[in-house]
Amino acid sequence: GAVVSQHPSRVICKSGTSVKIECRSLDFQATTMFWYRQFPKQSLMLMATSNEGSKATYEQGVEKDKFLINHASLTLSTLTVTSAHPEDSSFYICSASRQGTEAFFGQGTRLTVV
Amino acid sequence: QKEVEQNSGPLSVPEGAIASLNCTYSDRGSQSFFWYRQYSGKSPELIMSIYSNGDKEDGRFTAQLNKASQYVSLLIRDSQPSDSATYLCAVNSGGSNYKLTFGKGTLLTVNP
């Protein structure tokens, strides 16, 4: 399958600071990338759909000003958690879709806000 | 609201047995269906995809789809302790961009 790389795998930050997470498709061009959040013992919840060169589409209840998504190229999307608080602590996972094929997941980022 | 339902388990089977995982979905327009395996603290890993009614086999895994009943299942034959994980059912209602709706997952434990 295709390779999607997510960085960093773990990050600890202080409350009130911002954290950027990168998602790269290494061997294909991803027309669409997705950002998910997963709390302990819960399923993956889609946060937003990111299309290259256009604004992200956020799911209901997800604050677009808090979770900034940039998809500037066909191989890179970034999620910035702004003014992070302890309740933002979670496992963030990206996936990338090549047109007409399945979506492939990155390794995930464990965010802890202290 | 598009929903995907799974029995949360835990499902416990002895080594060598068949594990049967089930999933129902609400959106009749769903086009493709996936089973992912997720180990604790890790990202989901695609196991099977199925697009048309019937069975699809890949090694020890068989996916079954019944669109009329809005039902998809995963059978794992000759279960191994390494199969112990949470299995997520995912449904694509978003066409070619693969926007997935996930179930909550079924925790499978294979006992040696």
Image (tube, rainbow, N blue to C red):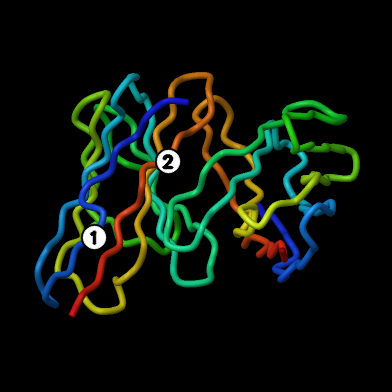
Picture quadrant of residue B56: top right
**Residue occupying the point 27% across, 23% down:** A74
> Does A87 sit above or below residue B110?
below
Q: Which residue is mark 2?
A: A105
Are the residues under marks 1 and 2 on the same chain?
A: yes
Element marked by disc 1 = strand
Q: Nearer the viewer, residue B86 or A59?
A: B86
- Left/right placement of residue A59 relative to residue B89 reads left
Work out whether mark 1 precedes mark 2 in sequence or the reverse, and give the earlier one.
1
Horizontal and vertical percent for residue B44?
50, 48
x 64%, y 60%: residue: B105
Question: Is A88 positioned to the left or the right of B42 in the image?
Answer: left
Q: How many marks?
A: 2
Residue kind at label 1, given as amino acid type: Arg
Side of B86 where A30 appears, left or right: left
Residue B19 visible in the snapshot = yes
Identify the subunit bearing mark 2. A
Which quadrant does the N terminus of chain B fall into? bottom right
The x, y position of residue A8, in whole percent, is 21, 51
SS class of the residue under badge 2? strand
What's the mark number on residue A43? none
Cα separation, mark 1 vs mark 2, equals 16 Å
> Quadrant of the rendered structure where residue A64 is?
bottom left
User: Which x, y percent locates residue B12?
Assistant: 76, 68
* Residue of label 1: A10
Three-letter amino acid code of the residue under disc 2: Phe
Question: Label 1 crowding class (10 Å Cα cut-off): few <14, some 14-19, many 20+?
Answer: few
The picture places residue B80, in percent across and down from the top left corner, at 70, 52
- Check the image and report above or below for B56 versus A63: above
Q: Residue at x 34, y 34 (%)?
A: A4
